[in-house]
Amino acid sequence: MKLKEKGNQESQKPELTHADRQGKAKMVDVGSKDKQARQAGAGGRIRMMPETIRVIRENQIRKGDVLTVAKIAGIQAAKNTPSLIPLCHAIQIDSVTVEFQFVESGIEATCHVSCEGKTGVEMEALSGVSLALLTIYDMCKAIDKHMVIENIRVIHKEKQDL
């Protein structure tokens, strides 16, 4: 399909990889691609009251060790991304790390994923950081009704030929 732009010039419509020519959903065929070393990282933040930060630091949340549970949730989410996101390829993941840093207004989280595969791991990294932050929210919602999860994004994506 072509799009008309200013000046009556034609340009090619960007091709969506997860849609066929009729716009119907499809899984991308990566069968002919070579395996590559792939890495991706994602980050995000949860804003919370200073008192909530304090009780997390001091491990005083009744549900348990918030950051340890959130870390496990993030790793589990990255590993299960194809079960959560339709059309996402199952990837043999080599490594998932989830890390947290206390900041003045809350907690910043990062998730890094690596594999040797035919497709990237940014969806796994995004799933990991999202579920880690959601777990923090779930474990602290009884004491802080004003938490905000924000700025979830890909922070890096790399691939190298093997």
Image (cartoon, rainbow, N blue to C red):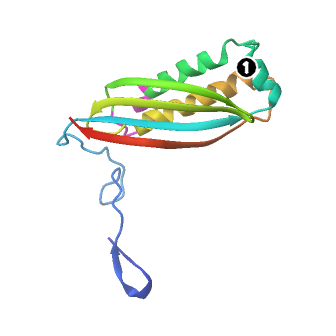
Q: SS of the residue at dot 1?
A: helix
**22 is within the stretch colored magenta:** no
| Image location (x, y in percent) of residue 17 | 33, 52
**81 is within the stretch colored magenta:** yes
From what the image shows, is residue 112 above or below residue 14? above
From what the image shows, is residue 119 above or below residue 74? below
Label 1 is placed on what type of residue? Answer: Ile
| Residue 35 position by quadrant | top left
Asked whether, in this view, residue 82 is left or right of residue 110, the answer is left
Asked whether, in this view, residue 33 is left or right of residue 151, the answer is left
| Residue 140 position by quadrant | top right
| Residue 95 position by quadrant | top left
Residue at image mark 1: 56
Residue in front for this viewpoint, 55 or 22? 55
Residue in front for this viewpoint, 103 or 61? 103
How many marks are shown on the rendered structure? Answer: 1
The C terminus - image quarter: top left
Task: Give the residues in magenta.
Answer: 79-89
Q: Residue at x 52, y 25 (%)?
A: 98
Q: Residue at x 56, y 29 (%)?
A: 131
The N terminus - image quarter: bottom left
Q: Residue at x 55, y 21 (%)?
A: 71
Q: Residues within 10 Å of mark 1 (few under 14, many from 20)?
A: some
| Image location (x, y in percent) of residue 36 | 25, 36
